[in-house]
Every structure is written in C-alpha cells, then in structure tokens.
Amino acid sequence: MHNHLIYGMDDGAKSFRETTKMLLQAKNNGVAIIYATPHVVPGRIDFPLKRFLQRVKEANDWCEENDLALSVLSGCEIFYTPETIRFLNEGRIPCLGDTNCVLVEFNPDVSHNELKDAARKLQNSGYQPVIAHAERYRCLRFPGRMAELQSAYGASIQMNAHFVLSRQGFFTEIWKKQVLSKGLIDIIASDSHDTRYRPCCLKKCFDSISAEYGKHTALSLFRHKLAHDEAADHGC
C-alpha cells in the first residue's frame, strides 16, 4: 500500500537492481501485490508519470520473467497541496491502482482542521483519502479525531510497520496500543525505501500483531481491500 521501490523516482530505490532486491524482500514477507507510491508534490515538483509507468511495467516484467508471483500497481504518495485535486482530475498523478483511493501525507505539525479540510475536499471530488503514516501527526494523538476522519470523510488510516515494531516513549506506546486495539488503524504498510535501513518488515509485524491482538485483527490490517479494486484483497 505504501512503498518506494521504483528506482530513480524519489528517495527510495536508486537502481533497477535495488528495485529487484526490494521485490524479493516483499515476496519473502508474504506480499502478493504492491502499490508503488513515489513521493509527489503537486504543483511544486514535476512528476514524470510516463517514466514512472514504464518502470512499473519493467518491475512487473521482471517478476514474470523470474516466476515471482508478485504484482506491482501504480500509485503515489501525495504531499497534499492546493493543486492536488486538479492534478488528480487531470490524470497527472495516479490514484492507487484501479481505484479512487489516494495516499496522502502532510507536514507532521498539520492541524486537525487542515487535515479535515483536505479529506473533505478529496471526498467531495470523488476520492477516498488514505492518510499515510498517521503516527507522524501530532493532531491525531487524540483517537477521536481518527474516528471522525473515518466516519465523516471515508478516510482510511495507515500506520507504518516499523512504528508498530519499534519501542516508543511511554505515552506514544499507550496511544499506539489504544488505536490498534480499538480498530482505529485500517492499514499496516511497509513504507519501504530500501532493503537495509527502511526494509519491508511486514511478516514480522503481522506475527507481532497476531500475538498481541489476534489473527483476525492482523488479517484485517494486512489484507485491506480498496474500493473498486478486487486485486487489492492481498497483502499490503
């Protein structure tokens, strides 16, 4: 659901060889489908959509040639700007696969009202927001605000696997356990940028959540199905 494996697009993979290593690592973590989500800043930095789609195809061709049962779908991680919806409507940046879902990120100090305003505008324009790595936003440390985004604006809330596995400060640990136990997180994703420093660790995270919250909870977090995309009923 959130991955930076397409080489030469952002601060993720730097070469095709690194892309293939990330594909193998994802497969070894039980992943069947990957949404490639390079960073995009609409209206600020040009996004080479044609090059991106060519490299997504290159990744899929490599998987097929090497009998790797893994599919790579297009997407992007959008740093929300006032131009976001126009760029989406014009087809200049992709949604997640064949869906109306968009992965969006914000400054860590984004206000709750700013986040709600972005989610409302996306929903009114026909898009379903997926809030990337929600653990980074201080305004969401009040769990009721997550629930409001989900119920009022149809947003999905994504958390990074590494954050789940790493030990946080006392109050952050309390918050993490609270939102996971109350079902306020919809998706766990890798946000993988490489195979060493920011690797895919979904299998370890799945096992950890299964042990603490039960396998049913783990399955719901790792097999999230996006609207209109039957192929998305696989690991994130």
Image: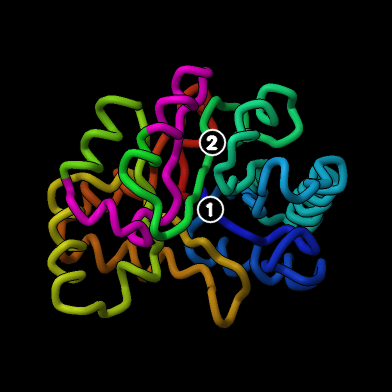
Q: Which mark is residue 158?
A: none
Q: Which residues are magenta?
A: 117-143
For residue 53, side relative to residue 144 (left or right): right
Report helix, strand or loop for mark 2.
Answer: strand
Measured as percent of width and height from the top left, residue 126 is found at 51, 18
Q: Nearer the viewer, mark 1 or mark 2?
A: 2
| Front residue of 194 and 66 | 194
Count of marks, rendered view: 2
Residue shown at the point (67%, 61%) measured from the top left: 5
Residue 189 figure quarter: bottom left
Residue 73 figure quarter: top right
Q: Which residue is mark 1?
A: 2
- CA gap between label 1 and label 2 equals 11 Å
In the figure, 178 relative to 186: above or below? below
Measured as percent of width and height from the top left, residue 190 is found at 48, 61
Measured as percent of width and height from the top left, residue 107 is found at 47, 56
Q: 10 Å neighbourhood of mark 1: few (<14), some, or many (≥20)?
A: many
For residue 231, side relative to residue 132 (left or right): right
Q: 10 Å neighbourhood of mark 2: few (<14), some, or many (≥20)?
A: many
Q: Which residue is mark 2?
A: 102
Report helix, strand or loop for mark 1.
Answer: loop
In the figure, 146 relative to 205: above or below? above
